[in-house]
Image (tube, rainbow, N blue to C red):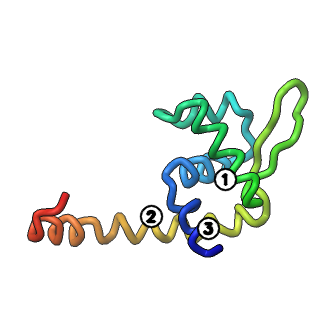
Amino acid sequence: MATDILRRVGEKWSVLLLAVLQHGPRSFNQLDRTVEGLSRRILTRTLRALEGDGLISRRPAGDRMEYALTDLGRSLLPLIVAIGEWAFEHAPQIEAARQRGGVR
């Protein structure tokens, strides 16, 4: 179970969608326009997975569906932000280690 959850929150599309939804509910088309490089097929799959995990909700809003963070999803945001800040802070050290080891 923990591995599945870590895999989900480690996916770049999941993280990006959660970050977008922290600013309020969005329709499918708004999400599609906001997240560059994400195909509609992957967007659909990722939204379904996030909804299945209870991190986002989906509800009718007029003639469209609207996606929003759940309380569970909101509780995850500070952790995602902390990981991003850690990565930014330590990027030079990680890059130096990669250069020494020849890994890219």
Sequence-earlier tag: 2 or 3 = 3
Read off the residue under disc 3: 5
Instruction: Provide residue 26's location: percent of width, then percent of height.
Output: 72, 38
Read off the residue under disc 1: 22
Read off the residue under disc 2: 84
Mark 2 vs 3: CB contact within 8 A: no
Left or right: residue 91 compared with residue 60: left
The image shows a total of numbered marks equal to 3
Frontmost of labels 3 and 1 is 3
Assess disc 3: are there few (<14), some (14-19) or many (≥20) residues with their C-alpha within 10 Å of its C-alpha: few
Sequence-earlier tag: 1 or 2 = 1
Residue 98, above or below 60: below
The residue under label 1 is which amino acid type? Gln
The residue under label 3 is which amino acid type? Ile
Sequence-earlier tag: 3 or 1 = 3
Residue 92, above or below 104: below
Instruction: Provide residue 24's location: percent of width, then percent of height.
Output: 73, 46
Disc 1 from disc 2: Cα separation: 15 Å
The residue under label 2 is which amino acid type? Gly
Instruction: Provide residue 74's location: percent of width, then percent of height.
Output: 71, 63
Question: Residue, x 68% and y 45% (percent of image)?
Answer: 47
Question: Residue, x 54% and y 63% (percent of image)?
Answer: 7
Residue toward you, 96 or 49: 49
Mark 1 vs 2: CB contact within 8 A: no
Q: Quadrant of residue 40?
A: top right
Q: Quadrant of residue 64?
A: top right
- Quadrant holding the N terminus: bottom right
